[in-house]
C-alpha cells in the first residue's frame, strides 16, 4: 500500500468592507509575483467568490505539504497576508480521495 498524499488547505476570508478589496487590488502585482516564486509549493490556488461570481471574498490555497506549520509560514510570506486583507484564515489537512486530479478513485489504489 502506498502512502496517501496529504495536502494543507488554507481558506482565507477577506475582512468585511471596501478597504480589503482596495488593498487586494493594490497588492495584486506583488501577490502574483510571490505566487510565481513559490509555485512549486502549490497544488492549486485562486480567489474565492460570492455565489454570483462577481465579488472576491477571499483566497484558497492547496499547499503541497502535510505540515500545517509549513503552510502557515508559506502563507505569511504572501503580500496579501502582510497587507492584512484576510480577517479569518483556516488551515485544514486534506487528502484527495477522488476526482480528475488523482485519475479517478485514489482510495482504491492506496
Image (cartoon, grey):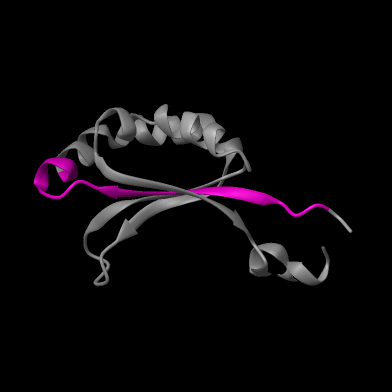
Q: Looking at the image, which residue sits at the far left?
A: 18
Q: Is residue 20 left or right of residue 93?
A: left
- Residue 67 falls in image quadrant: top right
Q: Is residue 109 above or below residue 4?
A: below
Looking at the image, residue 28 lies above or below residue 47: above
Where is the C terminus found, in terms of image quarters?
Answer: bottom right
Q: Where residue 74 sits in the image (x, y, percent)?
A: 49, 31
Is 8 left, or right, of 89 in this rendering?
Answer: right
Question: Bounds of the magenta span?
Answer: 3-21
**Nearer to the camera, 81 or 38:** 81
Judge whether residue 14 is colored magenta: yes
Residue found at the very far right of the displayed protein: 1
Magenta highlight on residue 15: yes
- 69 sits to left or right of 31: right
Q: Based on the displayed image, in which of its 4 quarters is residue 76 positioned?
A: top left
- Marker count (numbered): 0
* Pick the front one: 66 or 55: 66
Q: Residue at x 46, y 36 (%)?
A: 35
- Residue 30 appears at what percent x and percent y? 34, 29
Q: Position of residue 98 (x, y in %)?
A: 66, 70
The quadrant of the image that shows the N terminus is bottom right
The answer to whether residue 62 is left or right of residue 13 is right
Percent from the top left, x then y, of residue 89? 36, 45
Give the residue at x 70% y 63%.
102
Q: Residue at x 64, y 62 (%)?
A: 96
Seen at 15% across and 50% down, the residue is 16
Amino acid at each position: 500500500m502506498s502512502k496517501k498524499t496529504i495536502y494543507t488547505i488554507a481558506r482565507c476570508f477577506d475582512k468585511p468592507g471596501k478597504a480589503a478589496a482596495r488593498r487586494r487590488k493594490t497588492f495584486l502585482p506583488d501577490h502574483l509575483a510571490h505566487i510565481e516564486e513559490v509555485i512549486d509549493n502549490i497544488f492549486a490556488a485562486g480567489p474565492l467568490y460570492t455565489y454570483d461570481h462577481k465579488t472576491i471574498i477571499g483566497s484558497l490555497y492547496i499547499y503541497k505539504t502535510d505540515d500545517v506549520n509549513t503552510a502557515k509560514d508559506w502563507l505569511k510570506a504572501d503580500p496579501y497576508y502582510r497587507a492584512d486583507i484576510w480577517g479569518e484564515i483556516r488551515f485544514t489537512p486534506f487528502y484527495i480521495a477522488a476526482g480528475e486530479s488523482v485519475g479517478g478513485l485514489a482510495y482504491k489504489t492506496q
